Image: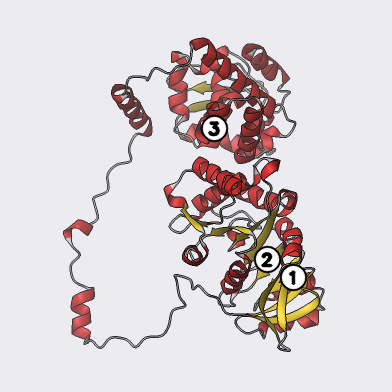
Amino acid sequence: MTVAIEMGQTTAGAAAAMDLEELLATRLLVQGNSGSGKSHLLRRLLEQSAPWVQQAIIDPEGDFVTLAEHFGHLVIDAEDHTERGLQVAGERARLHRVSTVLNLEGLDAENQMRRAAAFLGGLFDIDRDHWYPMLVVVDEAQLFAPAVAGEVSDEARKLSLGAMTNLMCRGRKRGLAGIIATQRLAKLAKNVAAEASNFLMGRTFLDIDMARAADLLGMERRQAETFRDLERGQFMALGPALSRRPLRLHIGPTDTKPRNATPRLLPLPEATLEDARAVILAAPPLEASRPQRRPAPDLLEQLRAAKSAAMETRPEPIELPVSAEELAERRERVDRTLRAVLAEPDAGFRAIGVLYQEFVVRCRIEGLGSAVPDLNEFRRMLTHARAGLGTELAEDDAWQEVTLRASILPDDMQGVFMMIARAAKEGWPCPGDAAIARAYGSHSLRRAQRLLGYMEEQGLIVCQLDGGGRRIVTLVELAWATAPGDPNGDDQPVEQAQSAASA
């Protein structure tokens, strides 16, 4: 049975229909400047298709939460949940076929990317038996699949871009139909946009965006100027689910409205200049007074104090109905699974979120069930594994000081610091730039050199060169020092020593 949903009318007055089943197989890209009616188009599409197919909406501004009252969507406020919780929520929504709105309002850009990636990962990582058809709408897709690196961390960008790439490139076989909307095509990653076969192009003014939109629609460059003349709510349509030739259509009305309506002009209040001066320049309340600047805290001392307080207030452990042998056997199976994940050829250069998804799948195959570590525990395990640390050394009291010092650094640097600390403790040669870059998940040798410089600035290590140009790294206060190692030399002796010690 073919299901056609009505999107509006063509310029000739005929009904503009979209083939829903074709859309599920070929995906959709919507582009339009702010005020072009892009969100209105998405709302019309969601309302018309709601009775026929399950939906998930990635909503960065909370515009689509009003769908809940009329169509029964479950609104998930991402600010109230962890990344792991959102991943599980995505899995359960797919399992029980519940339409959802992931409201990312109130989060900064990096946390929006992380939580959206976790939720999309949950939708994607589900057993084959539950690959039901589903529309996945991502508004402002350029935020989650940027063409170039922005101010967010590399890890957050890789997680989000990886999830969006999975949705658009591999989602079709899993029943996921990606519908992405963006203000500017030039800001959207090309490998994500290129997977769409249906296009709805709205009003735009920049030459680079008009030219790219014209190319996608198969129009000549001189026809690109027509995108400037489109009215609000008008779009040029092309694709197997819409029209085989470029077609101008006007989007029809919707039953629901966004929470944030378009601002309207209002007359200014009548007030004298003296009254305005008295209100605006009045002394601020005492509670809003800016506190005096204090000297920068000693991060290491704060961490030590926090650790001591946690040890004092730690509750008595709860006796679990699991024997010590069973716990040891579970730990060994988890460690074995992690080693299998890291044994993949490109594991050192994959995003943590992608590695964790594969790790969870392998743990389920092993039958670990509820014993699967969460994302934070996985990060800790991954840090130790990349540093060549076994479980025994990671839990050794003498090593806790190293772990405490590493916690000063960002998460993605801690494994590098621990690898160097391990080499210093064992008296091995200092790892070369290639080994340091690999532990950080990079191919750049310059980045490895910058990492060492950053750790030295933080007062954690001291780097020296001997007469032969070989590098020696000493850990501050611990007095551990590596043996001299060639920064550009072969890292095989170091890796072999670490492998032997781990075994």
Query: Taking 17 as reference, is 378 left or right?
Result: left
Residue bearing the label numbered 1 = 212
| Residue nearest the viewer, comparing 338 with 75 | 75
| Residue nearest the viewer, comparing 425 with 195 | 195
Examine the image and state in which quarter residue 203 appears.
bottom right
The reply to whether discs 3 and 1 touch (Cβ–Cβ < 8 Å) is no
Above or below for 47 versus 346: below
Mark 2 and mark 1: span between their CA atoms?
A: 8 Å
Give coordinates of residue 322: x percent, y percent: 48, 16
Mark 2 and mark 3: span between their CA atoms?
A: 34 Å
Question: If you read the primary sequence from the N terminus, does the residue marked by circle 2 or circle 3 appear first?
Answer: 2
Tag 1: amino acid: Arg
Residue at 18%, 62% (x, y): give it. Answer: 285
Query: Taking 72 as reference, is 12 left or right?
Result: right
Residue at 66%, 47% (x, y): give it. Answer: 162
Question: If you read the primary sequence from the N terminus, does the residue marked by circle 2 or circle 1 appear first?
Answer: 2
Q: Quadrant of the C terminus?
A: top right
Question: If you read the primary sequence from the N terminus, does the residue marked by circle 3 or circle 1 appear first?
Answer: 1
Examine the image and state in which quarter residue 275 appears.
bottom left
| Crowd class of label 3 (few under 14; some 14 to 19; many from 20; radius 10 Å) | some
Q: Which of the labelled discs sits on residue 379, or is there none?
A: 3
Q: Is residue 469 visible?
A: no
Q: Which of the labelled discs sits on residue 276, or is there none?
A: none
| Crowd class of label 1 (few under 14; some 14 to 19; many from 20; radius 10 Å) | some
Residue at 58%, 76% (x, y): give it. Answer: 37
Above or below for 132 versus 460: below
Above or below for 311 versus 169: above
Residue bearing the label numbered 2 = 186
Examine the image and state in which quarter residue 433 appears.
top right
Tag 2: amino acid: Ala
Q: Secondary structure at mark 3?
A: helix
Mark 3 and mark 1: span between their CA atoms?
A: 40 Å
